[in-house]
């Protein structure tokens, strides 16, 4: 992780560049969190994330129907060597300011693809607005 002292303008410019150069992908399906007791773990090959607390395993898997709280998922694989520190807070804050909605993020590591990658989720009801907002940011100038 990089440590730097930057102005707000420098941070904005750097993170727009991070967003523009990241491999950005929107997953086709909607997803939801399926929970099982912590002592009932099983590997689910459909899951894009599995995380637990002291009571449950939570699997982020394709939605089974519309009765669950469903999310649109998109991901970023960051360009190797580019300082992406602060990206999660920056994009989440900008989205909250613009659309009023929070997002969730699950991070992973793939050393073969530049290191850290993120899966992001937003409520399915505003997915189009969130994705359009991200495209607007990706098309912003970095001058």
Image (spheres, rainbow, N blue to C red):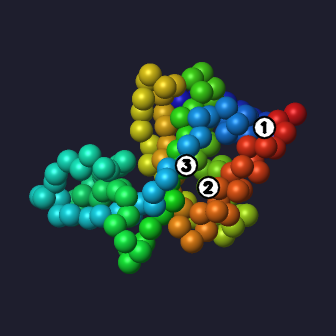
Q: Which of the numbered marks, if any, corresponds to residue 27?
A: none
Q: CA distance from mark 3 to mark 1?
A: 24 Å
Compared across the picture, whether 131 is left or right of 53 comes to: right
Query: Which residue lies under the disc numbered 2?
Result: 92
Look at the image and tell me whether residue 94 can be seen: no
Give the residue pinned by disc 3. Answer: 26
Give me the C-alpha separation between circle 3 and circle 2: 17 Å
Q: In the image, is 3 to the left or to the right of 137?
A: left
Q: Where does the C terminus fall, quadrant-wise? A: top right
Q: Which mark is residue 13?
A: 1
Q: Residues within 10 Å of mark 2 (few under 14, many from 20)?
A: some
First in residue order: circle 2 vs circle 1: 1
Near-viewer residue (95 or 83)? 95
- Where in the figure is residue 74, as x and y percent of width and height? 53, 50
Look at the numbered disc 3 and give the secondary structure of its residue. strand
Q: Tell me whether the residue at label 3 lies in contact with that at label 2, contact meaning CB atoms closer than 8 angstroms.
A: no
Q: Which quadrant of the figure has residue 33?
A: bottom left
Could you give the CA–CA distance between mark 2 and mark 1, rounded to whole angstroms? 16 Å
Residue sitting at 55 percent across and 49 percent down? 26
């Amino acid at each position: 992780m990089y440590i730097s002292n930057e102005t707000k303008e420098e941070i904005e410019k750097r993170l727009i560049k991070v967003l523009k150069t990241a491999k950005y992908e929107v997953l086709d399906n909607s997803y939801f969190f399926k929970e099982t007791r912590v002592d009932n773990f099983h590997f689910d090959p459909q899951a894009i994330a599995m995380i637990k607390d002291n009571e449950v395993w939570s699997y982020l898997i394709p939605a089974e129907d519309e009765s669950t709280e469903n999310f649109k998922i998109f991901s970023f694989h960051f360009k190797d060597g580019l300082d992406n520190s602060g990206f999660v807070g920056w994009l989440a804050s900008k989205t909250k300011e613009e659309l009023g909605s929070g997002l969730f993020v699950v991070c992973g590591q793939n050393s073969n693809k530049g290191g850290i990658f993120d899966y992001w989720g937003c409520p399915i009801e505003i997915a189009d607005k969130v994705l359009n907002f991200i495209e607007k940011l990706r098309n912003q100038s970095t001058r």
